[in-house]
Structures are given as C-alpha cells and as structure tokens.
Amino acid sequence: MIPELLRAALVIARRDFTATVLSRAFIFFLIAPLFPILLGGVFGGIGARVAEQASRPVVAVAMSPAEYRSLSAVRDRLSRAIGEDKLVRFKYVERAGDDWRGQARRLLTEPDSNVRAVVYGWFGDPHILGDVRPDDAIVRQVGMMLDDAQMPPLGAPNLKIDRVEGSTANLSQKRALTGQLGQMLLFFLTLLLAGMLLSQVIEEKSNKIIEVIAAAVRIDAMFLGKLFAMLGSSLLGITVWVTAGALAIASLKSGGLAALPVPAVGWPVFLALGFLYFAMNYLLFGAVFLGIGAQASTAREVQTLSMPVTFAQVIIFGLASTAVGSPGSTEALAAAVFPLSSPLVMVAQAAEQPQLWPHLLALAWQALWVGLILWASARIFRRSVLKSGPQRKWWKLGRS
Amino acid sequence: MLRQAQHERVNEGFAVEARDLVKDFGETRAVDGVSLAVPQGAIYGLLGPNGAGKTTTLRCLLGIIDPSSGTRRVLGTDKPLQAAHHIGYLPEERGLYPSMHARDGIAFMGALRGLPLAEGRRRAETLLAAHGLRDWARKPIRTLSKGMAQTVQLLGTLVHKPRLIVLDEPFSGLDAINQGKLEALIREQAACGATIIFSTHVIAHAERLCERIAIIAQGKVAFEGSVDDARGKLQPIVRLRTRNADGPWRSVIPTGSQRGDGEFVFELPKGGPEPLLKALIDGGAGIEALSIERPGLHEAFVAIAGEAAAAAMGAPVGEAE
C-alpha cells in the first residue's frame, strides 16, 4: 500500500504534469533550446567572420613571383604544423614600376581593401608597410617566414612516431573535460527550470485552491507532488532535446558521444548517474525554489525573486566547478558535502574517478536533504502563508 | 480507566469537539477559547458576524492551520488530516483550476481525499447530470458561470461521500434558487448520515436547517445549543392594542414601549402571560388586540452577538454603541 504522503503527492503530480504537458506553453518549453542555438548560429557566424577578418589579416606580397612562391611554401608547411587559422594570409600582387613603396601605400588605401600590410622589396632587402609595430604577430610571422624562405633547402629529418594511448596526464585532463561538460549540462538544465519552479504555487494561491489542498493533504505532499510533476515535465523535455540533439550531432558530425573521452565509470554508469544527479540536483533546487516561490503571491514577486536565485545558482556552479580536475581536494570534498553543489560535483567525479560507493553515499545524502528542505519549506509555508501555529522566530523553527 | 472509557463513549457521539481553541495571528487573537461539540449526524451552524472568527475556527478544526493552544478532535482523531478521506470541505474563497474540465475538477478533489480517479470521474458524471450540468462535464471550468462553478466545487466536496461536511459560507454568492437547492442538498446529505457544519452570517439558513448552533462573536462562543435554546434566551414579545388610553393597567406596561401607531411592544414579563392578562383586564385596558410572539433566531442572534461584542468592549449592552 502506498503511504498517504506519496499517494497524495502523486495525485498533485498527475494534475500538474498533465496541466503542464498539455498546455500550449509546453511547446515553447520544448523549442526553447532552439533559440540559443539559432542565436548562437547567427551571432556565431557573424562573430566568426569578424574574428576571421580580425585575427587572420591579409598581407599583400609585392615581390617577384619566385620569391612569393618560396614564401608561400614556407607558409604552407607552417600551416600543416600549427593550423591554417593561426597564420596570416598572403595575397600576391604584381610589382608595377619602380616606386614599390608608392605601390604598397596605394594597396593599403584602396577602397574595400582588406590588406593589413604590404611586404615589398626583395629577399635581400624586404620591407613591410602598414599600421604595424615590431612586436606584432603579423610582423614576427612574416619575418620568420622570410628567414625560412631564404634558407637553403635541407632534407627534413624523419621524425619517428611511437604512440602510447592515454597517458595519465592526458586521460585525466580529458575526463575532467567530460566531467565539466556533465556539470554544465546539469547546471544549465536546472537554471532553465528555476523560473518555472519559483512560480509553481502561484496558480494555487491565485485560484484559491490552496485552501482545498491544504485541508485534504499535507503541504509537504503538495510540494513533493509539484516537484515530481516538474521533474516529469523536464525529463520529458530533456528526452526530446537530447534525442533531437543526438540526431543532429549524428547527422552533422561523426563520432558524437564516442568522440568524448570515456568517463572513469564507463558510459552506461555515467549516463545513469548523470540522470540520477540531474534528478537530485533538480529536486534539491526545486525544493528550495518551491519554498521560496511559495512565499510570493504574484507573478511580479516571482520575477523579483528570480534574479537573486539565478545568482545563487551561478555561485553554487562556481563552487562545484572548483572540484573538477582535483577530485580529492578539500574544496572538492566541501563542495560534494554541501547539498546544493553535491550533484554537480559528483557528476564530474563520475567522469574522473572509477569508484562507485561515493555515489551511493552522495545520492543518499542528497535524498536526505531533499526531504529536509521540503519539510522546512512546508513548515515555513504553513507558518508564513497559512499563518498556522504559534508565532515563532525562524531560527527556532526546528525545535517545534 | 472507567473514566477514560466513559469519556471515549461520550466522544463517540460527537463528530467534532473543540476545547478552548485559541488562535493568534501576531498580536491579534482571532479565536479566543472556542469550545464546541458537534453531534454525529447533526446539521450544525456556526453563526457570527463578519470577522467573528468562524473561518479561523473551521480552519483550525480541519487542520489547515494549527491552533495556538487548545485541543480539537475530528472524527475520533486529534490530527484532522488523518481523517481527511472522510471530510469534505468547501472553503469560503472558492477555488478551482480554470483549465480543468468540470468532471476532472470534481474527480481531482475526490482523489485528494483518497477516491480513485476513475471512480471519481464516474461519480462526477452522475453528480453533474443530477444537477443539470451533464453538458458541461467535459468543458473547462473557466467557461462555466459563477453559479455553475460553485456547484462544481460543492460536488467536488461531496464526491467521496464524506462523513463530515464542512461548508464555509456556502450560500454566499448564490441566487435564491440555488440557495434553495443547496439547502435541499444539505438536508439530503444529513439524511444519508453525514454530519454537516456550515458557517453563515445569514440567520435564515441556520434557522431552517440547523439542529444546533454556535454563535461566535469576537472570537468567543457566545452561545452553543439548539435553535430553540437560542430563542429561549430572549423573552417572548407582547404586541398589544387597547381601546382605553389610560388607566391602572398601564402600571404593568414598561414605560416607553408605546410606538407611534399606538401599539405597545414589550417583552413578556417574567411571570408569564397569565398575570399580565389579569392585570390588563382588571385594570380596564379594553384589549383590542393582543399577541405573544416567540422571538426569531435573528433577534436572538443580534442580542447574543451584540451582548458578546459589548462585553468584549467593556460596556453594558445598552451602551454598546
């Protein structure tokens, strides 16, 4: 037989879940991640173009064709070693007349010219003209390429490669990256849902249904039901997002998850723990936000509360992120023990450390805190909103 | 042990008992030592002017709020939420989820009280049909009129067939026809064995429905008992018309009791009607018309509640203003 608290919570959860999922607003909730992706795409594209133009300046080379070929060959070799995007781009310009300096100046001032500097003269007496200083990357790169281009060609030594998979340093660095990704995912998902959680009790308060519910079930059952409903709605949303995202990644890029380093506990356990930690992170923050939001009577009050709540989440994320990369440190332990940062820390730890027992302990610890926060939230709600019981100071709340 | 057993037997007769309930909101005392006992199967009225503490008393009894002090016992338990499955409650401030269908709203309220959802839906269909709302069962509550929505909430209060029904100002906002229907529904529920407590400040409903009442004023119970007992608190009213304007008979009539139309209206003297009649006849009043009327609950309520208010303000009744 289901305990009454759970039964009542499920009644509330079913109502809330249905009301949320069958509302038009849920469609917007489902497509919400598209907006940052679209905006990211648009602004990213613009930014990339701007960055490309800013970081990869074009240098006109007004030298002999043979000199340009030598210079270009050096540039090509370098680009294979350090990447195309890190090098200046060359543009060949045929020399005209004897006034090479005058020609270079004209090249710089031509309308719509994207030339940042002009290299002119010959290998024995090269010049660079433009708004550049001796320590600019553009000058240093061109200088190095000119030096290299003038050297007599030597047979390159054959570098022998002896590959070892996953050195300790490399593996832990990559796993820390997986942990960080997991942490960020959890953080952003909870951040997205915070606003919804804050306003969960507003409907009941504004429609006066709270009185009917409070007379029939315990307030903590109502809070628990609301949390379950929101968890269900968000998991549904996340399933849709993840499926769509995975399909998109699979269609756009080969590798997908396989491209990420394997977490210390392995992918299946990591995903299972990720799911559990999402649920715990959600329930912990949800219990706090429900308690805070339940104090608000209007949507305006909820809006006022959202900003400090978001700041608090960012601070907790900051605390949790200190643990990534140093799983055994005091900071990591403190962040793992602090209930609100615990799920974020532990999901990262799942990527970095193979032991499973700390996760069992952490999940039990977090579940305990979900219960405690719900209990406290329900009591505060009864005292402050329903005005129930003798008046007490908040610091004496636990004693009754 | 014997005393305990006797006490429990006495308790079996009451659906609700409260002893010295006190509820403070900060510095304000909303309920001040309320004690009452509602017999099983009774229709019990909680009467009082606005702000007297009726709603707070009901909320304390139902466990929505905890009293600052005092005890309460509802359907045999001092933790009312434990008996929630057997209680139906219609709050003063009506509330429903506007997007829910009428049928689902009723089933949801039943489910909160332990009724399986499917059974709740089935009963909701039947109840809605019985109250002329069959066509509205699958429509969102926001599309219903205020009266219909109130009916839906009332049906939600009753759908799980509660043993105790608590209605806070159930008649407010209803037109005369719907008030009549609600009175019939209350009688019907009582006939099925349910105990009904309702609060009101409209005396006529209590007078027609209640077997017992409590009059609350200033957070205190000013009176608890039957409607007849409440009426008995006041002396019957004598209305007298005489042919003779003056004579020895005037000595039995309180001064200042003659109205502008010549009629005398005064409380029946303590001795009863016989000495009064004798004095009038012997004193040569020439009785033209005489009636002795029992005071209504309204008069009793005004007198009792007014007395309590005056007492709370520390002034004699006559100087209450």
Image (cartoon, coloured by chain):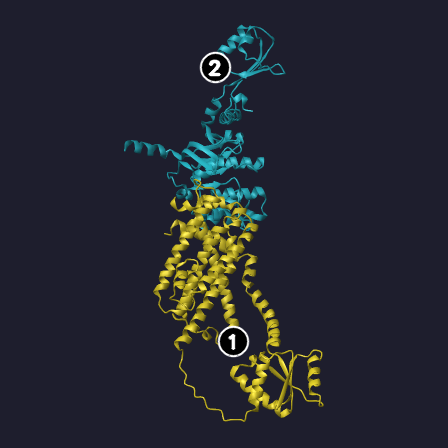
Chain colours: A yellow, B cyan
Which residue bears the numbered disc 1? Answer: A253
Mark 1 — on which chain does it sit? A
Mark 2 — on which chain does it sit? B
Instruction: Name above or below for residue B139 compared with residue A163.
Output: above
Which residue bears the numbered disc 2? Answer: B270
Camera-nearest residue between B130 and A321? A321
Pinpoint residue B242: horizontal percent, then vertical percent. 59, 11
Q: Is disc 1 in contact with disc 2, using a CB cutoff of under 8 Å?
A: no
Disc 2 is placed on an element classified as loop
The C terminus of chain B lies in quadrant: top right
Q: Is residue A171 left or right of residue A148?
A: left
The numbered disc on residue B133 is none
Q: Tell me the residue at 31%/31% (across/down).
A: B6
Disc 1 is placed on an element classified as loop
Pinpoint residue B254: horizontal percent, then vertical percent. 54, 13
The answer to whether residue B268 is seen in the rendering is yes
Dot 1 surroundings within 10 Å: few (below 14), some, or many (20 or more)? few
Q: Residue furthest left?
A: B1
Q: Tell me the residue at 44%/65% (across/down).
A: A322
Q: Is residue B287 left or right of residue B192?
A: right
The answer to whether residue B213 is seen in the rendering is no
Camera-nearest residue between B9 and B215? B215
**Between tags 1 and 2, which lies in front?**
1
Q: Disc 2 marks which amino acid?
A: Lys
Q: Quadrant of residue B60?
A: top left
Pinpoint residue A13: horizontal percent, then vertical percent. 46, 53
Pinpoint residue B97: horizontal percent, then vertical percent. 53, 49
The number of numbered badges drawn on the structure is: 2
Q: CA distance from mark 1 to mark 2?
A: 102 Å
Q: Disc 1 marks which amino acid?
A: Lys
Camera-nearest residue between A302 and A98? A98
